[in-house]
Image (tube, rainbow, N blue to C red):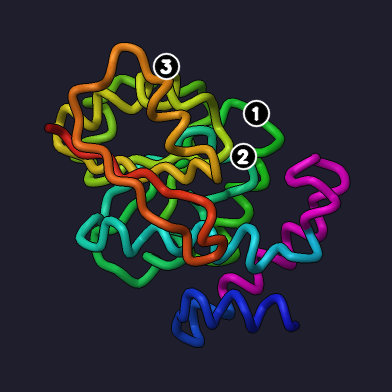
Amino acid sequence: MDDRAEALRLVPVSRETEDRLAAFVALLDRWRTRTNLIAESTFASVWTRHIADSAQLIALAPDAKRWIDMGSGAGFPGLVIAILLADDPGAIVHCIESDQRKCAFLREAARITGAAATIHPVRVEAIAPDSLGPVDAVTARAFAPLQLTLKLATPWIERGAIAVFPRGESAKDQIAALSPAPPYAIETLPSVVNPKAAILRIRRG
C-alpha cells in the first residue's frame, strides 16, 4: 500500500482511474508467474517502478490521443497509458507485441479495465505505418537499444508524432552513441520516479 500511495503521489489520477489500475495490477499478479511478464523482484514496487513510471509519459505529450507502444510486453507503458485515456473520446493506444502469451494478457487487461487499447500480435517491422491512421505519439520502454528503437519509430516521427522514450540513467551516453546523429530535436527530461533517469522526447526537426 505504501508503494501504491507513493506512485499516486508522483502521478495523481482520478479515483476511477486508480480502480482501473488496481484491477490491472491484480491481473498482473495472477498472470505473472506463468507468463513471465515482469521480473519477480520488481513486483513489490510495481506501482512506482512500473505504473507511475509509465503514467508520467502522458504529461510529456499532453495533446496526444493516438499512441503507438512498441514492444508492449506486460503493458508498460502502453496499457497504462490506455487506462489513463479510457474516458477520453477518440483516444487509442496501439500496443504492438509479438509474444502471443503476452498479447493474451494484454487483451484480458484491456477488457477488464476498459482501456483504450488495440492489441497487435506482430513485430513492429510488420506494421505498415499508414495502416494505423494518424498517430500523435510513439513510445517504447525496455524494448531495444536506442538506435533500433529510433529507427523503428522513424516512420511515425516523420509523420509528425512525438516520441517519448524512457532511457534510464545512461540516456546522454546513448544519445552520444547514435551514428549518424538523427535529424531530430531531442530533449532529455528527468523522470519523476527516479530523477537520475531520463526520458527522451523526440520531435521532427
Mark 3 near mark 1, Cβ–Cβ under 8 Å?
A: no
- Given the image, on which type of amino acid does mark 1 rest? Asp
Left or right: where does residue 17 sit relative to residue 86? Answer: right
Where does residue 9 sit, x and y in percent of width and height? Answer: 53, 82
Badges 1 and 2: C-beta atoms under 8 Å apart? yes
Q: CA distance from mark 3 to mark 1?
A: 14 Å
Where is residue 98 drawn, in percent x and y? 58, 26
Type of amino acid under label 3:
Ala
Residue 53 image-quadrant placement: bottom right
Residue drawn at point x = 24 percent, y = 30 percent:
156
Q: Earlier in the sequence, mark 3 or mark 1?
A: 1
Give the mark nearer the N terminus: 2 vs 3: 2
Numbered disc 2: secondary structure = loop
Q: Would residue 67 appear left or right of 44 to someone viewing this image? A: left
Judging by the rendered image, the residue that carries numbered circle 3 is: 126
Q: Is residue 84 left or right of residue 18?
A: left
Quadrant where the image shows the C terminus: top left
| Dot 2 amino acid type | Gly
Q: Residues within 10 Å of mark 3 (few under 14, many from 20)?
A: few
The furthest residue to the bottom: 15
Q: Which contiguous range is marked in magenta?
A: 20-42
Q: CA distance from mark 1 to mark 2?
A: 8 Å
- The residue indicated by pointer 1 is 99
Residue 100, image x, y percentages: 66, 30
